[in-house]
Every structure is written in structure tokens, then in C-alpha cells.
Image: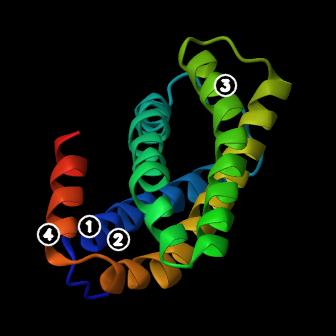
Amino acid sequence: MDFQRQTSRRLYEEHAASLLLLGRVERLFTGRAGAYPPAADDGDWPAFARTLLSAIEVEVARHFEFEERDLFPRLEEAGDGDLAALLNEEHSTIRAVAQPLVDLLRQALAGGLQAQQWQTLKTLALEFSERLGSHAQKEDGALLPLLEHLLDEDTDRELFGAYAAG
């Protein structure tokens, strides 16, 4: 998509990066066909788990906070409160899946999961992938085009600068 506003472009780029990572989540957890835990000599697993953990704790959290603090109130003021409420509700649902996933990823990296916990990790990872992927696509199709019209050049510059800095 070709967005004119820096804020929209940045969020779109982050969505694209998230969708790539979620593709890896789905390939990894469906490709193993339930073979958990990973083999002891699987060097790819810890690197992937750390990447996913960082994406959830840093990128997704930061992205959601920015939208909730700086964008959703603007949507409400512009009369698009239903969309803001829906996206905010989805954030809550995604966080509810992400937190136990984060806990299990940390525990897995420390080497402390039992067989049933690996199955739970797999289930949570796939649910997280489905929910976040759907959410990102919804924002690409609804939120970002609205921002193109809602934000003037100065507001866009301010928002983008604050988001990029922080």
C-alpha cells in the first residue's frame, strides 16, 4: 500500500514485519506436527523463541500503546469511535493470549517446560498468530486509510517523531 502519511507508512511497515514473523510462527508450530519439545540439538529454536519474545514484549506492546494513546482518541473525536473500540478490544484479547505465551517462552528458554506445557505453548503461539495477523490486516484496511485523511501534515510529523523517538 502507498501511504502518504509517515505514521501510516510506519505502522504498515510494522504490520508487514509482524506478518512475516507470524508466518514463521505458523510454519514452525504446524511443521513440527506436535513434536514437542524441540530436539536438544535444535539450535534454531532458542533464537526463534527469543525473536518472538522480543517482538511481543517490545514491538507489539509499543505499537499497541501508541495506537491507544495517540490514535484511538483521535478516531473517537472524528466520529470513528466504533472502530477505535473494536481495535482496542482486539488489543485486549491479543494481550490476554500474549501474556501466558511470553511466560511459557521464558520458561522454555530456561529449559523448564513439561510435555503438556509445550503443547500449550504451541496452541498459544498459533492463537496469537491468528489474532495478531487478523488484527494487523484489519488495521491496514481500516485504520491506516482513515489516518491518511484524519492527520494533517503537522500532526503526522509530531506523531511520527514521537513514535520514532520512543
Q: Which mark is residue 139?
A: none
Q: Quadrant of residue 98?
A: top right
The kind of residue on which mark 3 rests is Leu
- Horizontal and vertical percent position of residue 49: 50, 33
The residue shown at (17%, 58%) is 158
Mark 3 or mark 4: whose residue is earlier in sequence: 3
Q: Quadrant of residue 113?
A: top right
Q: Which mark is residue 104?
A: 3
Name the front one of labels 4 and 1. 4
Name the front one of labels 2 and 3. 2
Colour convention: rainbow
The residue shown at (62%, 73%) is 83
Q: Residues within 10 Å of mark 3 (few under 14, many from 20)?
A: many
Q: Residues within 10 Å of mark 2 (few under 14, many from 20)?
A: many
Mark 4 or mark 1: whose residue is earlier in sequence: 1
Residue 64 position (above or below residue 130): above
Residue 5 position (above or below residue 55): below
Q: Secondary structure at mark 2?
A: helix
Mark 2 or mark 1: whose residue is earlier in sequence: 1
Q: Residues within 10 Å of mark 1 (few under 14, many from 20)?
A: many
How far is disc 4 from disc 1 in space, using C-alphas? 11 Å
Q: Which mark is residue 154?
A: 4
Q: Find disc 2 in the rendering and name its residue.
A: 12
Q: Is residue 157 visible?
A: yes
